[in-house]
Image (cartoon, grey):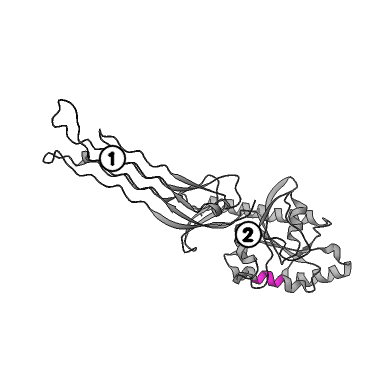
Amino acid sequence: MKFLDLAKVYIRSGAGGNGCVSFRREKYIEYGGPDGGDGGRGGDVVVEVVDGLNTLIDFRYQQHFFAKNGQPGMGNQRTGKDGDDIILRVPVGTEILEEDEETVIADLTELGQRVVLARGGNGGFGNLHFKTSTNQAPRRANSGQEAVERTIWLRLKLIADVGLLGLPNAGKSTFLAATSNARPKIADYPFTTLHPNLGVVGVDGVEFVVADIPGLIEGAHEGRGLGDTFLGHVERCAVLLHLVDATAEDVVEDYRTIVHEVEEYGHMLADKPRITVLNKIDALSDEELAEKQAALGAEAGPVMTMSGVAKSGVTDVLRALRGKIDSNRLRQKKEQEEAPEGWTP
């Protein structure tokens, strides 16, 4: 399945049906009086979070969504049928934005969430509503309310516990393949990963979700390379796993490049808990590994080591990630318990 995380959509609610001008026509009743019914209500345009989706690819092939109009009222005081709603089904983690791509209408982070994007118009009153003691045969009825049209953007931000960061070819996809059932493309050249991948990782009987995004390069926050397009997918992660290629000539400079891009990107991404790992250690001698680990540790603090190919040190990294995730969940639970009643973050 192809991956799509941004889609432009045109929506229109249903217009309300017009009220009816009608008079009772019955044998032996000369002056039957007004009996025009009301128009039906127009359908809404609703977005709903459903299970089983992890991409917005369906919106590549259909961008226009129009709800049904309400039917006009009829004689004998019959109200027109309401128009059918139309539902846009999206995956968990979808943001709905205004046409300017900046104003957030809704952030859908839970299964089953529903948001009405465009309400249908009310139906017009039939002439029965306008009958008075001085006007017993009104020939007036209301028109239904007009439809609401708007253009919106759908933007998907994957919801994962761990986000992988690193330069292209740092071993992120290899790590994901070694620790989960995900099968991302792996090759010995930069930008092998062209779209995000999700994998369910387990350690000590506990599972969590890891997101692998395309590698970052210098200037990614300004749109260079592929990283800027996909950094949003790690905004929701509880912890970041920063992989540094141990075979690089200058591991410290590689580390600084990623940290700078994350800080420049903003959105509080730089404030997230982070674990730094020196990867591909199977390709180094003990002396080279000790030298590079010491140099990187002086810059980044504690540095773990592993080899995604040889799977050495992987379990220790997973346990460290689990500890960070658990701490984040406890913190969120405590914040919710201490929050004022009725307040939602």
Q: As rendered, which of 31 and 323 lies closer to the eye?
A: 31
- Give the crowd class for mark 1: few <14, some 14-19, many >=20 residues within 10 Å: many
Q: Is mark 2 on a helix, strand or loop?
A: helix
**Residue type indicated by callout 2:** Val
Q: x and y percent of residue 294 in the render?
A: 80, 70
- Give the crowd class for mark 2: few <14, some 14-19, many >=20 residues within 10 Å: many
* Residue range of the region highlighted in magenta in the rendering: 255-260
Q: Which disc is residue 259 wearing? A: none
Q: Which disc is residue 234 wearing? A: 2
Instruction: State yes or no: residue 320 in magenta.
Output: no
Q: x and y percent of residue 281 in the render?
A: 83, 63
Q: As rendered, which of 205 and 185 lies closer to the eye?
A: 185
Residue 72 horizontal side relative to residue 45, left or right: left
Residue 302 horizontal side relative to residue 265, left or right: right
Total labels drawn:
2
Q: What element carries label 1?
A: loop
Residue 92 horizontal side relative to residue 303, left or right: left
Q: x and y percent of residue 141 in the render?
A: 23, 44
**Residue type indicated by callout 1:** Asp
Q: x and y percent of residue 108 in the render?
A: 52, 52
Q: Residue at x 74, y 45 (%)?
A: 205
Q: As rendered, which of 55 and 306 lies closer to the eye?
A: 55
Instruction: State yes or no: residue 257 in magenta.
Output: yes
Q: Which label's residue is closer to the chain start, 2 or 1?
A: 1
- Is residue 343 at all visible to an observer of this figure? no
State the image quarter where residue 31 is shown: top left
Q: How far apart are marks 2 and 1 (CA)?
A: 51 Å
Q: Magenta span: helix, strand or loop, mainly?
A: helix
Read off the residue under disc 1. Answer: 38
Which mark lies nearer to you, 2 or 1?
Answer: 1
Q: Which residue is drawn at 70% across and 72% down?
A: 256
